[in-house]
Amino acid sequence: MLFDSDVALLGTGLAPLVAAKQFLAQGKSITLLNPDWDFFLEDSEMPFDPFVPEIPRPDRIAKSQPDRQLEILRPEFPGALEFWAPEHQSLGFHDVSAPHVRQRGRLWIWIRSFEREKIRSWEKLENLYVEASDSGLNPQLLEDLPAARRFPGTLSTNSKVSAIFIPKLSDVDSIRYRNGLLEFVRERVNIKRFFSTVSQIEWIPGGIRFLSQGVPNTTTLRNGMLVFWTPRLSSWVLSQAKRRAVTPRFPRGVRLWEQWIFDTNQSLDPNTIGIYQDMAVWAHIEGMPKLNEKLNKKLAILKAGPLMQLERAPSAPLTWAGSESFTAISNVCHDLLGWDRLSIASMKPRTLFEWDHDHEEISWILSHENPMVRVVSGCDGPIAQIVRNTRLACSQLLAET
């Protein structure tokens, strides 16, 4: 029997592109199926693990060290993946247009108060300091001016601040990384095997049948199919699992996120990502930070919203921020940073799965029929997690077919 492709990949975002490169490197032919018309609509990748709203364990923090990130990300990118650190930013040749892994410390700050709940929050941070010290992460305790100087944006002089600083963590140019992989895959996959706006997928003996932009298509498969489970595909995955009496391991829920970007007239420190309450704050840049810090003028705030039950979560991100969001953003910009006014450049809403931290089930079998279908979980969120889980899922599928 002649097959159209070895493997079909269903999903949106970075995960199916990483899988495509994996299979192409092994000489496999692939068919890409995207429920959207573009790989960018869901935008399910984060440049770093935000560590909010809960204070993380040290083993989770250690996964964000630059060497670990580079070890995971470099083999899957078809080009240069650059590294930037403040201490050697001007050494040697540097491809400024390539995706960058940037070394930035994390600063957990706390406004000193006698309110009981805030005291409990500081106790949690003190516990983090002890555990991080035992794990060799070299945390530092800072207060007032030394803490304020490290925050990405000068803190108000009225703020009485305590902070824990952990150096040498990292973030990634997630959009550049995805762009580079998409360009690579497009050049190597037959245009007739690249389908968008896919719907009504059904199994047939030896393959699948589906609609793409309203046109019926049939594809026969040699090795099977991978489905990348993000909120965009949640309704389809759950309906197929129920139909086949399969009980997957479910995420804790779906977290709503808002990423705000502000234009400022203030110089921002590009070396630190600040964490305050349920928000991460950093100087928004691509590639290397400007050598002249006065040119780093965009402030980004990633705010964690509520955790919704899976069945109640929307399949697409919400489009409007509520009054609580504006109050929280105002607290950071007006009260913490001491700004008089704000200039909002953009606000991007996201919905992402949230798993238990000990989640180890990378993928599960949806169908034993011909073709075999595996559903991949943990393929949204921090970019290194997506790449790692996708690589493991590809290996599992090939080992079982």
Image (cartoon, rainbow, N blue to C red):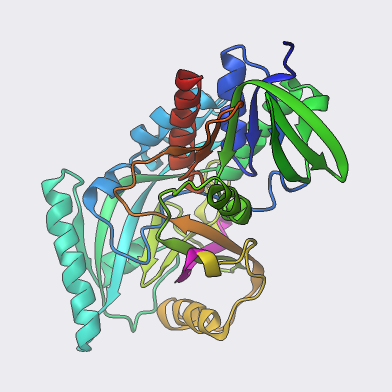
Instruction: Reply above or below: 195 against 156.
Output: above
Q: Position of residue 365 (x, y in %)?
A: 48, 36
Q: Looking at the figure, which quarter contains the N terminus?
A: top right
Q: Position of residue 126 (x, y in %)?
A: 16, 65
Which residue: 21% across, 66% down?
125
| Residue 319 seen in this snapshot | yes
Q: Position of residue 312 (x, y in %)?
A: 54, 70
Residue at the extreme right of the image, as rendered: 215
Q: Is residue 143 left or right of residue 240?
A: left
Residue 208, by quadrant, is top right
Residue 27, by quadrant, is top right
Q: Is residue 59 left or right of residue 262?
A: left
- Work out whether residue 69 or residue 217 is closer to the camera in this orientation and state it: 217
Which residue: 50% across, 25% down?
397
Residue 12, by quadrant, is top right
Which residue: 63% across, 69% down?
318
- Work out whether residue 365 or residue 137 is closer to the camera in this orientation and state it: 365
- Work out whether residue 293 or residue 150 is closer to the camera in this orientation and state it: 150
Residue 197 in magenta?
Answer: no
Number of numbered discs visible in the structure rendering? 0
Q: Which residues are magenta?
A: 295-310
Instruction: Reply above or below: 196 against 55.
Output: above
